[in-house]
Image (cartoon, rainbow, N blue to C red):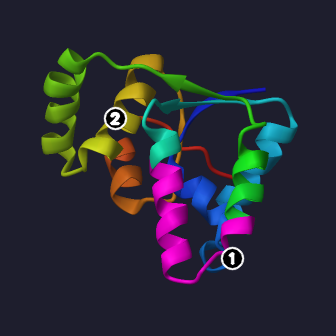
Amino acid sequence: MIRFVLDASIVLAWCFPDEDSSVARHIVGLFKQGSLAIAPSFWPHEVLNALLAGEKRKRISAALIQTFLNDLATLPIELGQVPSSIVFNRIQSLSREHALTAYDAAYLHIAIEQKLPLATLDEPLAKACENANVKLVRL
């Protein structure tokens, strides 16, 4: 069992067939082995927003979204709270230093602070992890 930071890009690859990834499938296996994921408190909003955008683009139905969300809710994903002072200072700094969105910098921050590997399919975030000496969850 391992603990790791889970980026929304992994979860969305499970749902959208055209975003299939061997890394995303590997993460499913980690959950089956009893691993625990950590994500920022905004993570459910980010996932839901992407699913709703997919519905508007006719990539997924409302029924499939609900089924997917019901399954997702059963996974051991712990949501971390970050005080606004950390967001306005440390996460802002990471965002600027690595040319990341504030959202992606939040994932990086959690991985750095908790000394955890990060699971992502987002290339700029993966590069930032490499530059910040944060391990990535890989096969």
Range of residues picked out in magenta: 46-63
Q: Amino acid at mark 1?
A: Pro
The location of residue 54, given as percent across then percent down, is 53, 73
Q: Amino acid at mark 2?
A: Ala
Give the quadrant of the N terminus: top right
Residue 102 vs 88, above or below: the answer is below
Q: Tag 1, which secondary structure?
A: helix
| Residue 17: assigned label | 1
| Residue 106: assigned label | 2
Q: Residue at image x 48%, y 62%?
A: 50
Which residue lies most toward the front here? 62
In front here: 122 or 133?
Answer: 122
Q: Tag 2, which secondary structure?
A: helix
72 to the left or right of 57: right
Q: Residue at image x 23%, y 31%?
A: 91
The location of residue 99, given as percent across then percent down, is 18, 51
In front here: 20 or 79?
Answer: 79
Residue 11 vs 62, above or below: the answer is above
